[in-house]
């Protein structure tokens, strides 16, 4: 799926879009290794982050390994289509969420997941 209109619609509808094949295996492996290294340097979150979440903030300032994904011409075009021309990255981060124990249900923290309808 590399059709601009379809990818833009996916981003607007879901909040993300997967673009297969934009990074080769070498770059993916290097980016994965760098993200793993960075995530290993931070502790578990608290409050907003939740106690089973790690975040590395200011990702583009901490590593050059994500530049290829962030500055890809197709990615920039899709972002501009969805948000508007002249869009700039101001917040980039990596998140590692560990699964909740089986049978505990979804984590309803800070209203991020929609609440069940109320009578």
Image: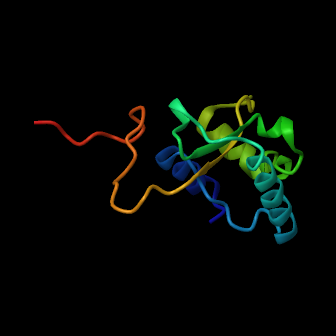
Residue 52 x, y percent position in the rendering? 54, 47
In this picture, is 2 found above or below 60? below
Spot occupied by residue 59 in the image (x, y as percentages of width and height): 78, 40
Residue occupying image coordinates x 58% and y 45% = 53
| Residue 111 against residue 24 in the figure, above or below | above
Q: How many marks?
A: 0
**Nearer-the-camera pick, 26 or 51:** 51
Q: With 51 as the anchor, is 23 left or right in this view? A: right
**Which x, y percent locates residue 15?**
53, 45
Determine the residue positioned at 80% across, 64% down. 28
Above-or-below relation of 21 to 65: below
Residue farthest to the bottom, as pictured? 25
Tell me the quadrant of the picture where the C terminus can be found: top left
Tell me the residue at 68%/66% (across/down). 20
Q: Nearer the viewer, residue 57 or 104?
A: 104
Look at the image and name its color scheme: rainbow
| Residue toward you, 97 or 113 | 97
Q: Residue at x 52, y 50 (%)?
A: 9
Image quadrant holding the N terminus, namely bottom right
Give the camera-side residue of 38 and 88: 38
Q: Which residue of the protein is positioned furthest toward the left in this rendering?
A: 119
């Amino acid at each position: 799926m590399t059709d601009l209109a379809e990818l833009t619609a996916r981003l607007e509808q879901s909040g993300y879009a997967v673009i297969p094949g934009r990074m080769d295996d070498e770059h993916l492996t290097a980016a994965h290794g760098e993200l793993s290294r960075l995530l290993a340097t931070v502790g578990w979150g608290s409050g907003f982050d939740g106690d089973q979440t790690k975040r590395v903030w200011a990702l583009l300032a901490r590593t050059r390994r994500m530049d290829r994904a962030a500055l890809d011409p197709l990615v920039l075009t899709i972002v501009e289509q969805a948000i508007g021309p002249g869009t700039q990255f101001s917040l980039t981060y990596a998140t590692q969420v560990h699964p909740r124990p089986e049978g505990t249900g979804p984590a309803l923290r800070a209203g991020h997941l929609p609440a069940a309808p109320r009578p």
